[in-house]
Image: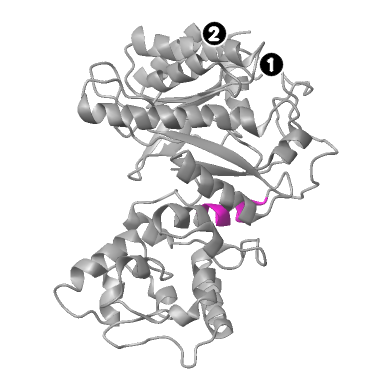
């Protein structure tokens, strides 16, 4: 099989992995390429720049037979495998032609986790040492691989990731009987320890080698199993706190395979995926907890309103908030106010007392915020506001402009977060 055909097969097989992202790490040193420069998969750096990555599997052959996976053992599809030399050569040639800025490398499991990891490491090491490639590399870590191989992955790659895929051990036993939650969490914990230790070491020894400088991430498949949004968000919250993950990616289940164990969906639950990303954003940057967004009585995210608005509507006793006196943390919880606009409010109010007209100039989305704030004692919402009355007004705005986002498109640009709500960070 020629190289072009292999590339076609393996790029197609890799497209369902959503956790392809660059955090724009800077490896330093001399060589070809640069992970911190903006640059065949589009991804987003932490400051909002779009780059391109060569996103491939080393092989789509696999010893596992996961019900949801297009590359499962029992799927009679075209199979291919790239050698380490081919992966390194392809990446460097694509880079020289300015097609890409880096590499996203994953793989099916051939022979064993250790054998697969050894081949992937050979490819990345050759890219670094032989081709002197200093650009971005995101490498998947294979659950069950030896600890020494996991450690090597963090030394050669900028970002590493171990995909959980299904939220509970029960779901893994049902759809991926060859995997357990423990085999996923063990390497994730090891990576977290090494990343933390590396940061401590580099504070005192600048020349110490960086270990996965762009951190680690994971992916959860949404809709293939019956877990609630609350269970998913509680798991994500624990991963952020205990494993110090950079990102948890949510991938709406796409029924690419027929199996009696899988749900019969007419279409992927994309809006649910979207709401989970919005809730995830609130966990990471807005000071919310999973229990504040969802509880046992309400375990599912609202598909009509974003989670920040739902929280505000459920806590009307905390509003309206006087923006000239409220803390930064309180201001962040107002629908229509993002991180950047909240900081602008704090700076501006030191110079003068803000009025409602000033808020719009500072980037606040007033069509949502107006029901939850006062400025200099001014209130622009509706009299005798109730949850239902505000919902009706918000729906009128939504029906006018079609917005489903936590932020409007213009606000995403202002915040430098274009693409992040849908996971392309």
| Residue assigned mark 2 | 83
Crowding near the residue tagged with mark 2, few <14, some 14–19, many ≥20 C-alpha atoms within 10 Å: some
Q: Quadrant of residue 36?
A: top left
Crowding near the residue tagged with mark 1, few <14, some 14–19, many ≥20 C-alpha atoms within 10 Å: some
Q: Position of residue 59 (x, y in %)?
A: 61, 17
| Residue assigned mark 1 | 79
Residue toward you, 319 or 5: 319
Q: Quadrant of the C terminus?
A: top left
**Residue positioned most to the bottom:** 383
- Real-space CA distance between mark 1 and mark 2, rounded to the nearest whole angstrom: 14 Å
What range is drawn magenta here? Answer: 269-277
- Give the colour scheme shown: one colour
Give the SS element for disc 1.
Answer: loop
Q: Does 145 appear above or below 354? A: above
Q: Does 123 appear above or below 68? A: above
Q: Quadrant of the N terminus?
A: top right
Evaluate whether residue 161 shows in this view.
no
């Amino acid at each position: 099989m020629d190289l072009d055909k292999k590339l076609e097969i393996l790029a197609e097989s890799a497209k369902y992995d959503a956790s392809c992202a660059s955090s724009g790490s800077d490896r330093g040193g001399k060589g070809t390429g640069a992970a911190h420069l903006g640059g065949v998969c589009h991804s987003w750096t932490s400051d909002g720049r779009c780059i391109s990555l060569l996103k491939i599997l080393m092989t789509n052959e696999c010893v596992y037979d996961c019900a949801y996976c297009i590359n499962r053992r029992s799927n009679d599809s075209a199979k291919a495998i790239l050698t380490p030399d081919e992966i390194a050569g392809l990446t460097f040639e694509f880079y020289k032609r300015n097609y890409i800025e880096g590499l996203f490398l994953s793989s099916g499991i051939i022979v064993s986790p250790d054998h697969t990891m050894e081949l992937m490491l050979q490819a990345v090491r050759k890219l670094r040492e032989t081709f002197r490639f200093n650009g971005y590399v995101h490498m998947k870590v294979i659950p069950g691989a030896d600890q020494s191989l996991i450690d090597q992955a963090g030394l050669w790659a900028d970002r590493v990731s171990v995909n959980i895929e299904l939220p509970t051990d029960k779901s893994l036993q049902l759809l991926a009987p060859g995997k357990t939650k423990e085999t996923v969490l063990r390497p994730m914990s090891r990576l977290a320890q090494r990343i933390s230790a590396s940061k401590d070491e580099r504070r005192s020894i600048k020349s110490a080698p960086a270990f996965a400088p762009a951190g680690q991430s994971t992916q959860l498949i949404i809709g293939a199993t019956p877990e609630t949004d609350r269970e998913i968000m509680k798991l994500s919250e624990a991963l952020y706190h205990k494993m110090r993950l950079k990102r948890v990616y949510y991938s709406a289940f796409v029924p690419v395979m027929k199996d009696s164990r899988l749900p019969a969906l007419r279409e992927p639950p994309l809006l649910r995926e979207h709401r989970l990303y919005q809730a995830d954003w609130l966990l990471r940057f807005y000071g919310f907890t999973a229990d504040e967004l969802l509880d046992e009585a309400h375990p599912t995210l609202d598909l009509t309103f974003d989670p920040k608005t739902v929280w505000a509507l459920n806590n009307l006793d905390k509003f309206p908030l006087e923006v000239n006196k409220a803390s930064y943390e309180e201001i962040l919880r107002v629908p229509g106010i993002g991180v950047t606009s909240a900081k602008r409010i704090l700076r501006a109010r030191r110079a003068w007392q803000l009025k409602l007209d000033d808020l719009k100039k500072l980037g606040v989305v007033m069509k949502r915020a107006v029901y939850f704030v006062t400025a200099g004692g001014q209130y622009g919402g509706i009299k005798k506001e109730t949850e239902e009355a505000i919902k009706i007004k918000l729906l009128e705005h939504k029906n006018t402009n079609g917005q489903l986002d936590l932020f409007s498109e213009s606000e995403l640009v202002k915040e430098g977060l274009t693409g992040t709500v849908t996971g392309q960070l």
